Image: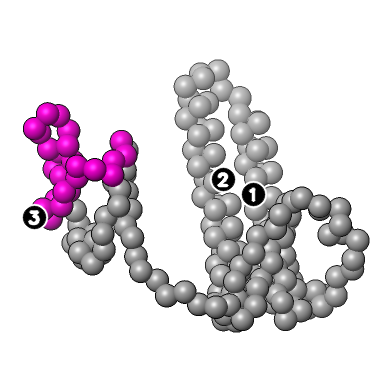
Amino acid sequence: MTTCYGFKIRDGCLLLPHRRRKLLRIPLTSHTQAIIAHHEIRSVTLTQDKLSLTYAKQITLIKPNGFIGIDQNLNNVTFAATDGSIVKHDLSEATQVKTTYREVRSRMRRNDMRIRRKITGKYGRKDREKVNRILHHASKIIVQQAKDHDSGIVMERLTGIRKLYQGSCTNMETVKGGRIAAE
């Protein structure tokens, strides 16, 4: 359920219209209450096990000194800054995790479909969690690099991709485990 209207926050609880003249009371944690006390709530989304509150926040715009362009590939993500530096972050560990869990799931030999689904679901969750951790680490490095140099981040556009590979790259560096090493 997602709503932008009719909800209220009173006495540390979120009140959602449930039935005619009936409100559903959802208690909020003290942390949530402290955050929303200073912001305007825009919408509320309620699922079976989660509550999401969307709020507006004032930010100060900065004028970037340069830009960092990001190129994603299967086994790496490369980002190049306008100052000429190019950094390559190795993502082959994520590919290896995917391959390993795919092999584990393919070797599943259970007669009971219910048990097979439960076990493959467990391995699917583990797979996603590990890959998400690796990707989060890579994105964190890129954002930190942009913050350090007051740069904006530009994602790649795949139109005209053949033209991108006509030039040659210089000044290549590789990031492994958060450390930058020259190739």
Residue identified by numbered label 3: 11
Identify the mark nearer the N-term, 1 or 3. Answer: 3
In the drawing, what numbered circle is on residue 127? 2
- In front here: 122 or 40? 40
Residue 97 is labelled as: 1
Image quadrant assignment for residue 34: bottom left
Image location of residue 163, percent across then percent down: 86, 57
| Tag 2–tag 1 contact (CB < 8 Å) | yes
Percent x, y of residue 73: 73, 54
Which part of the image, by quadrant, shows the C terminus? Answer: bottom right
Residue 57 falls in image quadrant: bottom left
Give the secondary structure at mark 2.
Answer: helix
Residue at 70% over, 58% down: 156
- Horizontal side, residue 93 vs residue 27: left or right: right
Q: Amino acid at mark 2?
A: Asp
Which residues fall within the magenta stretch?
1-26
Q: Is residue 40 above or below residue 148?
A: above
Locate residue 8, reporting x and y percent: 16, 48
Give the amino acid at mark 3. Answer: Asp
Determine the secondary structure under disc 1: helix
| Disc number placed over residue 73 in the picture, else none | none
> Position of 125 compared to 60: left or right?
right
Kind of residue at disc 1: Val
How far apart are labels 3 and 2 at the CA level? 41 Å
